[in-house]
Amino acid sequence: MSEVVSYNREGAVGVITVSYPPVNALSHAVRSGLLAALEQGQSDDNAKALLLVCDGRTFVAGADIREFGKPMQEPGLAEVVAAFENSPKPVVAGIHGTALGGGLELALGCHYRVAVEGAKVGLPEVKLGLLPGAGGTQRLPRLTGAQKALEMITTGDFVDAGEALQLGVVDAVDAGNDAKVIGMKFAEKVISESLPPRRVRDVTERIEADKGSDVFSQFRAGLEKKARGLFSPFKCVDAVEAAFNLPFDEGMKRERELFMECMQSPQRAGLVHTFFAEREVSKVPGLPKDTPVREVNSVGIIGAGTMGGGIAMNFANVGIPVYLLEVKQEALDKGIAIIRRNYENTAKKGRITSAQVAERMALIKPTLAYEDFGDVDLVIEAVFENMDVKKQIFGQLDKVCKQGAILASNTSTLDIDEIASATRRPEDVVGMHFFSPANVMKLLENVRGSKTSDEVKASVMAIAKRIRKVGVLVGNCYGFVGNRMLHQRGAEAVALVNEGASPQQVDKVLTDLGFPMGQFAMSDLAGIDVGYRIREERRKAGEDVAPSWMDKLAEQGRLGQKTQAGVYKYEEGSRKPVVDPEVDELIAEFRREQGIQPRDISDQEILERCMYVMVNEGAKILEEGVAARALDIDITWIYGYGFPAYRGGVMFWADQVGVKTIYDTVKNFEKTLGGAQWKPSALLEKLAGEGKKFGDL
Ligand code: 3H9
């Protein structure tokens, strides 16, 4: 018998148990083991019905993603599922945890499904750039009808056991929490009532009902917007449609063809990289797994502005009480009102109840007094970017906070070590850089100072998980990982416009690559005054900062979305950027003043300059150890700046373009354009020379 799948009989029920931690993924060993156990069940004359269950925390959570991209070893999953479906003895699946992807497909091959309360089922293949490839697109719609199957398969969202029961995906839900116990009960009922094997492939009512309906064309039209740039959601619709137009076996063949198209697509490679990278970021090299973490059961936040308020919501959302501090009552009231409005808007959309709004608001306690921070476990400072102010605040925190409290700054650029120097406990000081809007964006860039203790590093990574963010631990430097790279892209985008590109041309190249917005639409969102103020400060400090047409915008009061005019203009109440001829004129005037003769700039040049400058900076970040691995940079860009997950992150994307190609182009830009940003990183040069990738590091 296989080590990962066992067969034994209990009374008249033959029990097949999968035991392959952590999630019982359908590796080659599990697939072969399942077939062997099924055969044993068939030849066991005393077994009148079979029960399939799993050990550990979950039912089968899908195909083994680690096998993707490698040659497939027989038996394939579809074959295993068919063997279960064709079993002459009735087979029951007992589901706990999550039955996902190939796991749900296997359960759909069984004749009856029972789930423990709280279990979830879903076909999340689309999130990996795939479609269900073992009959999910053919069997699920036979139970749920077209609309729900399309929703589940194109979003990959899970449904809980209760909804699965209503949809007919499972036959019973039991309050007991042991899938084997409830599965046995159901199997015994199957035996006592002589229930026959009920094969989903033969269920036709829902197929007949939805045949020829316009649900598919409508669904495709909706996807054009929702799944912009994605490949597999459209293939999912094609596959589900085949269930309505073709006999079952032909539909299975069509599903296979479409599945293989997805498997070979670069998006699948990007999304699978993202899946594993998202899990790897939490395992920080050099930070032992058993590093103790500090408990955080109360938080203090300084600054009730957009950032501070958004950060407070993250904690209230998971039931952690927060003190929100401001210096003036008026600012505090305003901040609290905005939080309330945000929660009420979420409630209006039906995502939380009004009772939850009240609960969360009750967890956020406004205060004007630092003394209230005396007992909190974590403080996050979220005031504007000014070193003197921050140092003063940290000096104050050092006085009022208890020993062992974590003192964090939400700075997006400033030196954590200098901030820590204002305290007598630099080992407790750390950066926790949230991304705007802080209650929405998933990234938490945790910044270690040179003296931050391992315990504090591990604790802030654990906090990220607790507030449902993806934490990345990075080193201390100007802009850390994300903004340091963004800064280079921003400067390059402005230079491209100086030379002759239009802001909308630059933005379009970036959105065509898959960014949700371009560089200039993003500047309008953040506020044109932010960059302007930084440049002015640097000029005052005697630095040679080149004039920019962006300065002219700020001086004219075009501060971005908040003034309905920036690089673009905005209609009242709309966030949609509209090209403004006045800005074209302003740019033309700037070029005349600077004596610049504009030239035509190709989209390819824009792409190379905006992206390769980031890759080169990313390589420097790796070289310096600011990011430990290329995947840390990838996750930063996916969850902090909306880089498309299907491209796997900036450094993964660079590997696909080719490190050598990028190096050669960077070298060329160094010659033709000059500037420190185009000096190739030593790491980029080394990898290009050795024919290696960032992924090989
Ligand atoms: C599919 O099924 C295709 C078929 O239709 C057709 C085939 C022909 N394989 O997320 P966690 C690892 S496509 C291999 O931290 P949680 C994961 O890397 C698949 N490994 O835990 C991690 O490893 P480590 C469709 C997997 O409790 C560990 O398990 N299925 C797989 O937060 C724990 O994972 C999916 O897309 C896998 N399938 O969440 C489901 N899944 O400890 C993907 C997990 O070394 N999985 N691992 O870092 C999930 O959504 C979540 O893992 C799950 C648990 C909800 C199950």
Image (cartoon, rainbow, N blue to C red):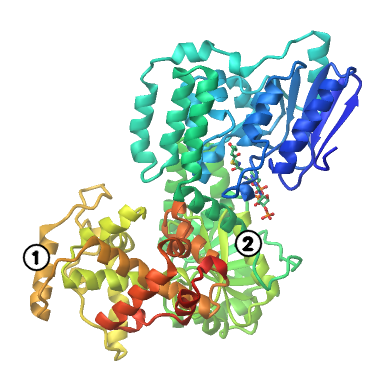
Based on the displayed image, in which of its 4 quarters is residue 525 positioned?
A: bottom left
Q: Is residue 377 visible?
A: no
Label 1 CA crowd tier, 10 Å (few <14, some 14–19, many 20+): few
**Residue under the point 65% across and 16% down:** 199
Q: Which residue is mark 1?
A: 585
Label 2 CA crowd tier, 10 Å (few <14, some 14–19, many 20+): some
Q: Secondary structure at mark 1?
A: helix
Disc number placed over residue 282 in the picture, else none: 2
Q: Is residue 575 visible?
A: yes
Lateral position of residue 160 relative to residue 156, left or right: right
Residue 284 percent location from the top left of the image: 64, 68
Disc 1 Cβ-to-ligand 1 distance below 8 Å: no
Of residues 356 and 551, which is closer to you in this image? 551
**Residue under the point 90% across and 18% down:** 46
Q: Is residue 46 above or below residue 650?
A: above
**Residue under the point 26% across and 65% down:** 606
3D distance between C-alphas at marks 1 and 2: 49 Å
